[in-house]
Amino acid sequence: MLAKKRISNTDLIWIFREKLSEFSDCPGSIKIAIVPSDAGWTVVTAHRDRNARPDCVKRIEQIQKQLREVYVLAKD
């Protein structure tokens, strides 16, 4: 198993934005935040966005799963 790369919260958000831009059901206006969690980190979206864009939320969860295998949040 390869060691995970350390990444800043800001850089991880940029990667998410880039990946989400590939999908028409995920507008650039969707609000996301990355917060530390028991799993290392978790993407959080606004309640309004979760309700209005369930397909985008599924994409976020898929991308999160992929990126968690590669990245760990760097300590500030």
Image (tube, helix red, strand yellow):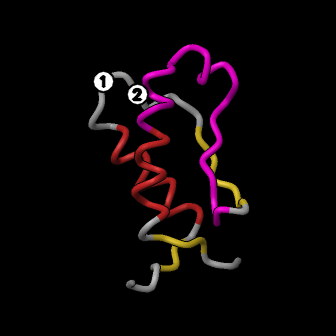
The residue at the far left in this view is 22
- Which residue is at a point 53% across and 30% down the rendered structure image? 30
Q: Residue at x 70, y 24 (%)?
A: 47
Residue 26 on the magenta span: no
Q: Is residue 75 above or below residue 27?
A: below
Kind of residue indicated by mark 1:
Ser
Q: Which residues are magenta?
A: 39-59
Position in image of residue 4 (x %, y %): 46, 79
Mark 2: which secondary structure?
Answer: loop
Magenta segment includes 55: yes
**Horizontal and vertical percent for residue 62?**
42, 44
Closest to the observer, 36 or 27: 36
Asked if marks 1 and 2 touch (Cβ < 8 Å), the reply is yes
Farthest residue, direction top: 52
Of the 4 image quadrants, the one containing the C terminus is bottom right
Instruction: Give the residue pinned by disc 2.
Output: 26
Q: Secondary structure at mark 1?
A: loop
Q: CA distance from mark 1 to mark 2?
A: 5 Å
Residue 28: x and y in percent read 43, 32
Camera-nearest residue between 31 and 70: 70
Quadrant of image for the N terminus: bottom left
Q: Answer few, some or many: residues within 10 Å of disc 1's Cα (few below 14, many 20 plus, some between 14 and 19).
A: few
Q: Residue at x 64, y 66 (%)?
A: 40
The kind of residue on which mark 2 rests is Cys
Q: Is residue 1 above or below residue 39?
A: below
Instruction: For label 2, count other residues whose C-alpha is less than 10 Å away and answer few (under 14), some (14-19) or many (20+).
Output: many
Number of numbered labels in the structure image: 2
- Residue under circle 1? 24
* Apparent side of residue 53 relative to residue 66 in the rendered image (left or right): right
Q: Residue at x 44, y 85 (%)?
A: 3
